[in-house]
Amino acid sequence: MKILFLIPVFALSACEAMMAPATTPAPGATPASAPGAQPIQTLDPTPPPPPPAAATTVDEFDTTTEEDKAEALQIDTPASAELGTTLVTLGSPADPGIWLKTPLVSSLTPGRVTYRDNEANMELRPSGGAAGSGSEMSLPAMGLLEIPLTEIAEVTVFER
């Protein structure tokens, strides 16, 4: 009878040996800012640099220049077509630039995104997700649109 109580203990102890610590990167994974990491495709001819590997604060992760932010907020032409609405969350803060990864586009596209009374020009990147699967937005883009970083926000997306 006592042996029956020991079987779950032995079974669960084997599971622990298979689990990797949470801080260990997946085999073959390369940090975004590591030397040799594949550059992210972008429409920006002078993209901002990736954040430092030791970045921990919003200001350290946001490497976008003030000029790029001002350009994103300069709305001087009307958007050409509304692509739809999507729910957005914060994307990888290690990916620099002002962008939205969304299933609403199938290729890199210049676009505009509105949230409440705010709007900004940004790069629309294909997410590869299914329609309605939601989108991810860069840290600087969320700041420009004044979206709280922990919010799931509904935005309207336009092609420029």
Image (cartoon, rainbow, N blue to C red):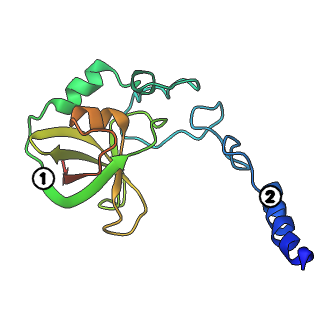
Judged from the image, the secondary structure of the residue bearing numbered disc 1 is loop
Residue at position x 87%, y 66% from top? Answer: 10
What amino acid type should be assigned to the residue bearing mark 1? Answer: Ser
Residue 52: image x %, image y %? 54, 23
Q: Which disc, if any, is residue 18?
A: 2
> Which residue is more in the foreground, 33 or 1?
1
Residue at position x 50%, y 29% from top? Answer: 50
Asked if the residues shown at circle 2 and circle 1 are in contact, with their CB atoms under 8 angstroms apart, the answer is: no
Left or right: 89 in relation to 80: right
Residue 70 position (above or below residue 113): above
Residue at position x 46%, y 42% from top? Answer: 92
What amino acid type should be assigned to the residue bearing mark 2? Answer: Met
Rounded to the nearest angstrom, the CA distance separating label 2 from label 1 is 53 Å
Q: Which disc, if any, is residue 21?
A: none
Residue occupying the far bottom of the picture = 1
Residue 90: image x %, image y %? 37, 44
Residue at position x 38%, y 69% from top? Answer: 130
Which quadrant is the N terminus positioned in? bottom right
Residue 129: image x %, image y %? 41, 64
Judged from the image, the secondary structure of the residue bearing numbered disc 2 is helix
Residue 132 position (above or below residue 52): below
Residue 132 position (above or below residue 73): below
> Which residue is more in the foreground, 31 or 49?
31
| Residue underneath mark 1 | 80
Q: Tell me which numbered mark, 2 or 1, is placed earlier along the sequence.
A: 2
> Which residue is more in the foreground, 129 or 151?
151
Few, some or many residues within 10 Å of mark 1 (<14, 14–19, 20+): few
**Residue 126 quadrant:** bottom left
> Which residue is more in the foreground, 51 or 45?
51
Few, some or many residues within 10 Å of mark 2 (<14, 14–19, 20+): few
